[in-house]
Amino acid sequence: MKARVYVFLKSTVLDPQGQAVRNALAGLGHTGVADVRQGKVFDIMIEPGTDVESIAREVLTNPVVEEYRIEYPE
Amino acid sequence: MKARVYVFLKSTVLDPQGQAVRNALAGLGHTGVADVRQGKVFDIMIEPGTDVESIAREVLTNPVVEEYRIEYPE
């Protein structure tokens, strides 16, 4: 069974990595890009019953500046 | 308009970052986790007509070891 956890910086937190990507794209002529935010994604193969919620909350995310979302693909 | 680009290491390429997460989870008692692969995700705000495909292929991905997927949420 597969779970997917997305971790993004909170929208109120500055994302310098995303800004760097945006500026690089602008320099390369991709002027149609208004904003970029970069996050992490974890594809986790789990046994049924595994507590993905607590893995995401306690291990994968820094709750001060980040937020997470869990999806179960397919 | 929003586009989302996922960048993962190809499945044939070793993912040491994901392995480190997996080992950390095992050490913390999350034994139900068989495998973890970590990737990057870019949320890109674009003007309609922007060539996201070429942005993903030429800028965000290293084609030697990575592969990408594009989604248009909502």
Image: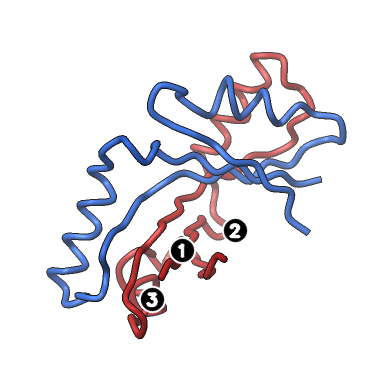
Chain colours: A blue, B red
Q: Residues within 10 Å of mark 2 (few under 14, many from 20)?
A: few
Q: Is residue B53 above or below residue A19?
A: below
Question: Which of pointers 2 and 1 indicates the residue nearer the eye?
Answer: 1
Q: What residue is rendered at 59% in x and 25% in y?
A: A57
- Are discs 3 and 1 less than 8 Å apart at CB? yes
Of A60 and B38, the residue lying toward us: A60
Which image quarter: residue B29?
top right
Q: CA distance from mark 3 to mark 2?
A: 25 Å
Q: Chain of mark 3?
A: B
Q: What residue is rendered at 54% in x and 48% in y?
A: B14
Which image quarter: residue A15?
top left
Q: Residues within 10 Å of mark 1 (few under 14, many from 20)?
A: many
A30 sits left or right of B44 in the view: left
Describe the element under mark 1 as helix, strand or loop: strand
Work out whether mark 3 precedes mark 1 in sequence or the reverse, and give the earlier one: 1
Q: What residue is rendered at 69% in x and 39% in y?
A: B35
Percent from the top left, x then y, of residue A72?
74, 49
Q: Chain of mark 1?
A: B
Identity, as a three-letter code, of the amino acid under mark 2: Thr
Work out whether mark 3 precedes mark 2 in sequence or the reverse, and give the earlier one: 2
**Residue where numbered disc 1 is placed:** B5
**Residue where numbered disc 3 is placed:** B52
Percent from the top left, x then y, of residue B50?
33, 80
**Residue where numbered disc 2 is placed:** B12
Percent from the top left, x then y, of residue A33?
27, 69
